[in-house]
Image (tube, coloured by chain):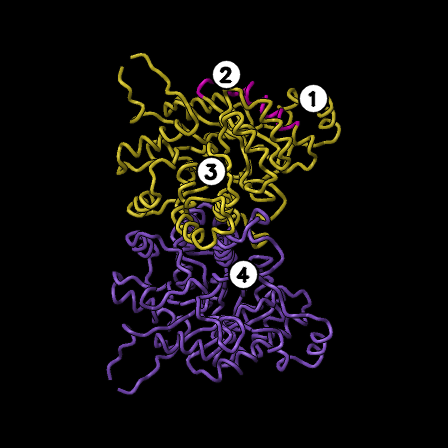
Chain colours: A purple, B yellow
C-alpha cells in the first residue's frame, strides 16, 4: 500500500452549513422555547455578514433546488465539494449568530439546538464531515456548559467563536471557554464576523459594509495580540487556535511589530516568555480563503517565506461563499509539492488530529 | 552652485514639543480660562501614551537641564537633532491631548493657546521648524475655526489629528476639518494616540498597554479604509494625509485586501473610481519611526518593493521618544542613493511643500 496522502489529499477546513430558518431547530428545542418562538414572532438571531439574497454572498449554482439558502443542503455540499474534489475531511463552521441574543437562556438553548441539529443532519449522515460547536460565547460559563455537553462527541473538532466580541478573547472572562476546549481536546476557531453590539472598528461605526469587511483583518489582529499578551499560551501550552477567513498576508508585519514592542514592554507582561511570533507559529493556524493575496505571485512567495513556517496555512473553500477557490486554484503550482501538501491537507490533519483515511489498494 | 539636497538633505517630519504644564499656556489664554484653571485645580488635559516618568518614553539624555519633560526645550532640540544631523526642516507634532476635554469651549481655548505658544516659543525663534496645528478634533466646526484663524501662518504645515477617534475620520461630521485644511493648503497629519473615550480596539478594552501600542497599527488601517471608502480623495483631489508613527510594513497587505474587496463591493461606494491602493500611493505618506521593520534586511527590501512606490515614506526621528533612530541608522545603507534621498528629505519636501534651503557655495 502506497501512502499518497502527502501529495494528493484535500482537507477543507471551512465549509458552511446554514440553518434555513429557526423552524428547523424547533425539534431540538425544549418545549418552553418552542412555545416562546411560536408565540413571540421571534424568527431567529440576526446578523447580516452574508446577506442571503445578495448575489455576491454565494457562488452561483449553490442554491439548493429544494429551496433554502446556499449551504443548507448536504446533498449539494457532497456533490459540489466533497465528491467533486475528493475531500477527505471537511470541517463545518455554522455561523448561526447566537452572540446577538441577549437573553442568556435563549442563546444557550439555540446553541444546543444547532449542535444537536448538526449531529443529526450533517455529522451522522456524512462521515467525511467534522463540525464546530456553536456556543453562547458572550456567556462564557454557559458556553463551557455546552462544550462539556457535546465536546467529546467525535464529530466536533472545534469551538466556533466570532472574531468580533465585546472584549478581547484573552480577557479572563473567557477562560472558562478555553479551559472547556482543553478538557475535550478541541481547537478554538475564531471566525470572521460576529454581532457583539460594539462597533467593528477601534474608531466607532463605519458607514459602509466594505469598511467592515476589509477592516475585519484588524479585528483578527487585535484578538491575536490579546491572546498572547494575556498569556493564554503560557497558561495553556496545548491550546490550539484557528483563525478562519482572517486572511494572512498581514501576519509578517504583525509579528515584526509585536516582537519588537514585546522586547520594549515585556516587563508589563512577564509571563510572556517568548517572542510573540513563536507563539503564533506554534499555536495558531489560518484558513486559506478568502485569500488576501497580492496580484503578483512573487509577492505571495515573499509573504510565505516571511511567515517563517510552512505549517500555518490550511486549505479551505469557504463554500458556499463567493470567495470559493477550488483545490486546483487555491495553491499556486509554483509552490513546492511539500508546501502544497501541507497547505492542502497535512497542516489541518495535524492541527485537528484527523486520522488519514485508509483506502484499499 | 551644486545642488546636493538629493543625497544629503535631512527633513525630520516628526519632532515633539511638549507642553511642560498648563501654566505655560496661561499667558495665551483669555482671562476667563486663566481664572477657571487657577480656581478649579484643572491641571491640563489627560493622556498617558508616553508617561513622562517612564524610562522608555524618551531617549536618555533628553531631559532638559533646566527641568521639564523631554521635548520641552528648544535649545536641547537644536543641539540633539537640528544641529547634530544638519536637519534642514523639522516638523513639530505637539501631542497636547485636547481631544480628552469634553467642554468644547475649553478644548478650543486650549488648542488656540497651544498654537500661539508654538508660534511664540518654537516657530519664531527657530527658522528650521514647522509645526502642526493642535485642534479640538472632536468638535469639527471649532477645529475648522482654529484652522481658519492660524492656517495661513507660514510656520504651520499640518493639522494634528489623533488616530484614535470616536468615529472614523471619513465620517461626514469631519468634513469641516478637511475643507479648512484645503483652504489653507495644509496636510492632515494623523498621529499615534488619542483619548476619544471609546476603546482602542474593535473588541473593547484591552488589559495591557502593550496591546494598545501594538494594536495602534490597526487603528491607522481603519482610518485609511474610512478615508478612501467615504470618497474623501474623490471629493477633495488635492487632499494630503500623513500618517505619523503608524508603521508601514502592514501597508502592502492592506492594499491587496482592499483592492480585492473593492472589486467585489464597489457598487456600494460608486464614487470610489480607482483602486484603493492608487489613492494611498497618491495621497498618503508615512513617517518612518517607529519602524515596524523585520529583523531581516531582505524582508524589509521586499516590503519596500511591495509598497509599489518610493514616495510614501518620510524620515523622522520621533525625538525625544525612545524609538529614536539617527539619520545614519534610519535607512539601511543597502538602499539605493535615490531611495535614501527620497526617504530622508525629498518625499517630505514635496509633500509639505518645503522650499530647499539655499546655501552659499
C-alpha gap between disc 3 and disc 2? 27 Å
Q: Nearer the viewer, residue A283 or A132?
A: A132
Q: Are marks 4 and 3 in contact (CB under 8 Å)?
A: no
Q: Quick check: is B119 in the magenta stretch?
A: yes
Q: Residues within 10 Å of mark 2 (few under 14, many from 20)?
A: few
Above or below B173: residue A256: below
Residue assigned mark 2: B125
Mark 2, mark 4: which one is toward the viewer? 4
**Image x and y of residue A39, in percent:** 73, 74
Q: Residues within 10 Å of mark 4 (few under 14, many from 20)?
A: some
Instruction: For residue B177, say whether it is visible.
Output: yes
Q: Is residue A314 left or right of residue A209?
A: left
Ranked by sequence position, the earlier of labels 2 and 1 is: 1
Instruction: For residue A286, say whether it is visible.
Output: no
**Image x and y of residue A301, in percent:** 29, 55
Q: Which image quarter holds the C terminus of chain A?
A: bottom left
C-alpha gap between disc 1 and disc 4? 52 Å
Q: Nearer the viewer, residue B195 or A326?
A: A326
Labels 2 and 1 share a subunit? yes
Q: Quick check: is B100 in the magenta stretch?
A: no
Q: Residue furthest bottom?
A: A360
Residue assigned mark 1: B30
- The chain holding disc 2 is B
- The residues colored magenta run B109-128
Disc number placed over residue A49 in the picture, else none: 4
Residue assigned mark 3: B243
Amino acid at each position: 500500500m502506497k501512502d499518497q496522502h502527502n501529495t494528493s489529499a484535500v482537507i477543507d477546513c471551512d465549509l458552511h452549513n446554514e440553518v434555513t430558518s429557526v423552524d428547523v431547530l424547533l425539534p431540538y428545542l425544549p418545549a418552553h422555547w418552542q412555545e416562546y418562538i411560536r408565540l413571540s414572532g421571534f424568527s431567529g438571531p440576526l446578523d447580516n455578514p452574508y446577506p442571503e439574497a445578495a448575489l455576491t454572498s454565494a457562488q452561483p449554482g449553490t442554491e439548493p433546488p429544494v429551496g433554502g439558502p446556499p449551504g443548507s443542503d448536504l446533498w449539494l455540499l457532497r456533490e459540489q465539494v466533497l465528491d467533486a474534489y475528493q475531500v477527505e475531511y471537511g470541517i463545518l463552521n455554522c455561523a448561526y449568530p447566537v452572540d446577538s441574543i441577549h437573553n442568556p437562556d435563549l442563546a444557550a438553548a439555540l446553541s444546543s439546538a444547532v449542535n444537536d441539529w448538526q449531529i443529526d443532519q450533517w455529522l451522522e449522515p456524512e462521515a467525511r464531515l467534522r463540525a464546530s460547536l456553536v456556543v453562547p460565547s458572550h456567556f462564557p460559563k454557559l458556553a463551557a456548559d455546552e462544550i462539556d455537553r457535546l465536546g467529546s462527541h467525535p464529530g466536533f473538532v472545534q469551538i466556533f467563536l466570532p472574531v468580533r466580541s465585546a472584549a478581547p478573547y484573552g480577557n479572563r472572562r473567557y477562560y472558562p471557554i478555553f479551559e472547556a476546549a482543553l478538557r475535550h481536546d478541541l481547537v478554538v476557531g475564531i471566525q470572521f464576523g460576529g454581532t457583539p453590539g460594539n462597533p467593528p472598528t477601534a474608531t466607532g461605526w463605519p458607514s459602509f459594509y466594505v469598511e467592515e469587511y476589509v477592516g475585519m483583518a484588524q479585528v483578527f489582529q487585535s484578538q491575536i495580540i490579546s491572546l498572547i499578551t494575556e498569556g493564554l499560551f503560557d497558561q495553556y501550552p496545548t491550546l490550539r487556535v484557528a483563525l478562519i477567513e482572517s486572511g494572512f498576508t498581514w501576519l509578517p508585519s504583525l509579528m515584526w511589530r509585536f516582537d519588537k514592542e514585546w522586547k520594549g514592554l515585556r516587563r508589563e507582561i512577564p509571563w510572556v516568555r517568548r517572542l510573540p511570533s513563536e507563539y503564533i507559529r506554534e499555536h495558531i493556524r489560518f484558513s486559506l480563503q478568502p485569500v488576501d493575496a497580492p496580484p503578483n505571485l512573487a509577492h505571495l512567495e515573499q509573504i510565505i517565506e516571511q511567515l517563517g513556517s510552512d505549517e500555518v496555512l490550511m486549505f479551505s473553500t469557504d463554500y458556499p461563499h463567493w470567495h470559493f477557490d477550488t483545490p486546483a486554484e487555491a495553491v499556486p503550482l509554483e509552490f513546492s509539492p511539500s508546501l502544497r501538501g501541507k497547505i492542502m491537507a497535512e497542516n489541518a490533519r495535524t492541527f485537528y488530529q484527523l486520522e488519514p483515511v485508509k483506502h484499499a489498494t
